[in-house]
Image (cartoon, rainbow, N blue to C red):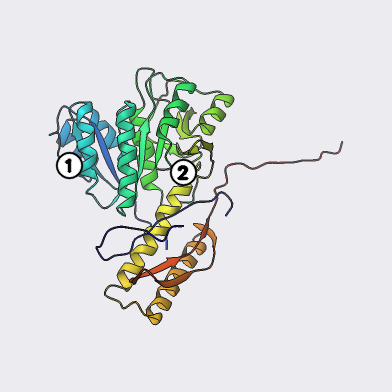
Amino acid sequence: MSTTVTSHLRPGVYSVYEASAVVGRSPRRGWAGVVGLSEGGTPGKVYPLGTQAEAAQAFGKEDNLTQLVQVCMANGAARVLAVPVEDSSGYAAAFALLAQEENLKVVVCDSETLTVQQALRDHAASAAQDRKERIAVVPGGAGETVTQLTTRAASLNSERVVLVAPGETAQDGGARVAAALAGAICGEADPARPFGGAALQGIGSLATRYSESEVDTLLQGGVTPVELVGGVCSVIRGVTTRTKTGEAADATWRELTTILVVDDVIPSIRAALGAKFARAKNTAQTRGAVRSQVILELEGKVAAEIISGYGEVTAQALESDPTVCLVTFSFTVAQGLNQIWLSAQITV
């Protein structure tokens, strides 16, 4: 791992992470950013919304953005920052507005346009570099085939982007389904808990039902499929669009929970160190205390079953800059239970 974590000069706790396929949780529900077409809102304005009724009052009861906000809240978002847009040209500016917000856990948009979704991907990546970690959720295109969906996922290819399909109707790209999943991510307090089987409230129909072979193709291709069983819409398995590193296939970031755990552990440690070591001296005594605090935080994550273990923690002054304390550590993400295999021997 490179020791150059940031090029900024502002004091603070900065972080960088790498993942290898081999190698105190917060109960507060997360906030969501919702960007969508609206006929009732003022484009270029952020609307902080605490209830579904406030969305209807701001944009109109039947407005598209109102529907997205309401289904997002119904599935667990504690609060929504909504940004209305008039057309496809307004999404980039809306993402720029949300880039200034601190508390977002998820950002969802209703656009099926690939370039808009790629802009949202870039927004999520840039926000993470600025210590504002968040996940982007986007819908598949209306009526897209399994092949078209996996191609779309490959064009996004990010551990911070979730592509969900199908939509509610053949003419619908699935914006409400994406908003429902965004709300479910916000509402999940345990980042290591898998999303397979998570019910999505407010989704009463789906355009299609995928076969088992199609589900396998979608999951391998970085698409999160949903299904309707007994009138309940649920996630089959939560995955990200990150399927490659460069040109090589890479399943390291496949599980959505992997990046959610990273976004729980790293900011928690960052916040703890920032609160306890503001204006501290970079001495051996301080570095020892920093190391102890990191271990304390990691032990808490192990106890909460967010991580299954961690490696050696070190804290040392950086030779090239004596004002920097370089803390290094590794941890293993707790894996979700997606399948149970039964092997039975029967005697007759």
Q: Residue furthest bottom?
A: 285
Task: Give the structural element (helix, strand or loop) at label 1.
Answer: loop
Visible in this render: residue 76?
Answer: no
Q: Nearer the viewer, residue 230 or 159?
A: 159
Q: Is residue 153 above or below residue 321?
A: above
Image mark for residue 46: 1
**Which residue is farthest front?**
320
> Circle 1: is it few (<14), some (14-19), or many (20+) Cα within 10 Å?
many
At 56% across and 49% down in the image, what residue appears? 21
Q: Which residue is mark 2?
A: 256
Q: CA distance from mark 2 to mark 1?
A: 28 Å
Label 2 amino acid?
A: Leu
Mark sitting earlier along the chain (2/1): 1
Q: Residues within 10 Å of mark 2 (few under 14, many from 20)?
A: many
The three-letter amino acid code for the residue at tag 1 is Val
Q: Is residue 294 left or right of residue 69?
A: right
What residue occupies the far left of the structure in this picture? 42
- Tell me which residue sits at (38%, 61%) in the image: 268
